[in-house]
């Protein structure tokens, strides 16, 4: 009897230790993956901007297109890797969660630190496009729970139209500011550009591999779906660079990341990340929570921005509004794990 008891106890201890080791290893994979994605994204942005200067593209075009595409690379690589591995909920959850985090987490915290001014382009152009694409994504998925290659092509073509209109509007505006474009990159050598591209590409590839692998294991060990991990851990992780940049700028009382840039990021997430990913591999919704709950939160965060822009103080996103948005995000995160 004692022998059987000790044998069972030993098995339980060994099993628990093995599970703990797997969990620790998976968490390390996620952390290393996120670090590689941040590093890879930074090198890709620098090399893309330097290459664009070599191709004689204007500073404005580089800022509105090249930088936007490059900064969406981490989300894109993660989504493609997940879709190819058959983890489509991570592909979709990553974008839905990132769009929620960009508004609830990044914008909320930035507004708490310092008020953000809202320009007219917000409600005349950027916000309507973001809301339209958000609802188009909802309709595509609601129809058959699959984002097909044709629907992905529609999203990608809509991005091209958006960029065309964006550049045309920017050319008409005399006060277009593009602080994210570093003029010093004009003098970058061809050798440096190639090295940066190789480092950026390798870091993004291996970072996405480690992040998706670690996230899948964590989801299984915690008994939650991949979609839950995607809309929380992965989404927050891919939003860390924007959050860090915004907080640092706000603390220095410099111009923080603009509302327009965050909305633009959400547009790119839907149109380019999901568009390109679904062209490579159709994205099927497996976790019903993504469509029954999470996508409504994404639509809600998108819709609430318009009344916040005008009530009570027009065209200013101050501390009370920031607290409201951030509190809503905390409620969202809590509800994701409760359900």
Image (spheres, rainbow, N blue to C red):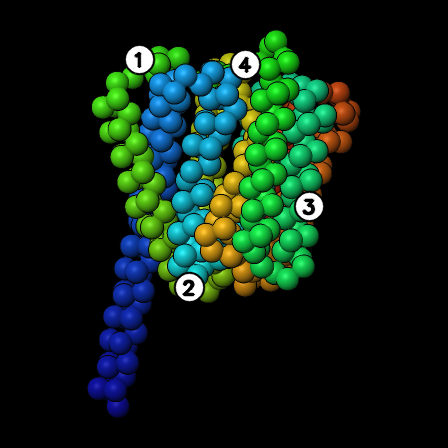
Q: Position of residue 338 (x, y in %)?
A: 58, 58
CA distance for labels 1 and 2: 49 Å
Q: Earlier in the sequence, mark 2 or mark 4?
A: 4
Residue labelled with disc 2:
220
Q: Position of residue 265 (x, y in %)?
A: 54, 33
Q: Earlier in the sequence, mark 4 or mark 1?
A: 4
CA distance for labels 1 and 3: 43 Å
Q: Position of residue 329 (x, y in %)?
A: 60, 42
Q: Nearer the viewer, mark 2 or mark 4?
A: 4
* Residue at 68%, 46% in the rendered image: 135
Q: Nearer the viewer, residue 217 or 72?
A: 72
Q: Earlier in the sequence, mark 3 or mark 4?
A: 3
Residue labelled with disc 3:
135
The answer, for residue 333, to whether it is visible in the render is no
Q: Nearer the viewer, residue 207 or 126?
A: 126
**Which mark, residue 177?**
4
Vertical relation: 133 (above or below) 48: below
Q: Nearer the viewer, mark 1 or mark 3?
A: 1
């Amino acid at each position: 009897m004692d022998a059987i008891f000790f044998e069972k106890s030993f098995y339980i201890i060994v099993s628990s230790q093995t599970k703990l080791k797997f969990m620790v290893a998976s968490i390390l994979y996620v952390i290393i993956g996120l670090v590689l994605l941040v590093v890879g994204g930074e090198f890709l942005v620098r090399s893309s901007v330097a290459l664009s200067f070599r191709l004689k593209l204007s500073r404005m075009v580089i800022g509105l297109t090249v930088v936007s595409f490059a900064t969406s690379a981490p989300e894109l690589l993660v989504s493609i890797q997940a879709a190819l591995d058959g983890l489509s909920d991570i592909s979709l959850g990553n974008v839905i969660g990132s769009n929620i985090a960009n508004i609830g987490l990044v914008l909320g915290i930035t507004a708490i630190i310092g008020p953000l001014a809202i320009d007219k382009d917000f409600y005349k152009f950027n916000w309507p496009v973001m809301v339209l694409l958000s609802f188009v994504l909802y309709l595509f998925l609601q129809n058959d729970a699959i984002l097909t290659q044709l629907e992905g092509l529609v999203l990608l073509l809509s991005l091209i139209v958006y960029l065309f209109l964006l550049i045309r509007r920017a050319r008409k505006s005399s006060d277009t500011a593009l602080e994210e474009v570093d003029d010093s990159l004009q003098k970058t050598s061809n050798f440096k550009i190639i090295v940066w591209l190789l480092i950026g590409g390798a870091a993004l590839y291996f970072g996405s591999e480690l992040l998706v692998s670690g996230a899948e294991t964590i989801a299984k060990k915690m008994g939650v779906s991949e979609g839950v991990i995607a809309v929380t851990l992965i989404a927050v992780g891919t939003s860390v660079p924007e959050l860090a940049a915004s907080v640092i700028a706000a603390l220095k009382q410099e111009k923080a990341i603009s509302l327009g840039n965050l909305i633009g990021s959400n547009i790119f997430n839907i149109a380019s990340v999901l568009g390109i990913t679904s062209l490579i591999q159709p994205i099927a919704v497996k976790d019903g929570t993504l469509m029954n709950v999470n996508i409504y939160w994404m639509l809600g965060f998108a819709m609430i921005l318009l009344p916040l822009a005008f009530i009570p103080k027009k065209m200013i996103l101050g501390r009370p509004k920031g607290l409201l948005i951030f509190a809503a995000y905390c409620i969202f995160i809590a509800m994701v794990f409760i359900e």
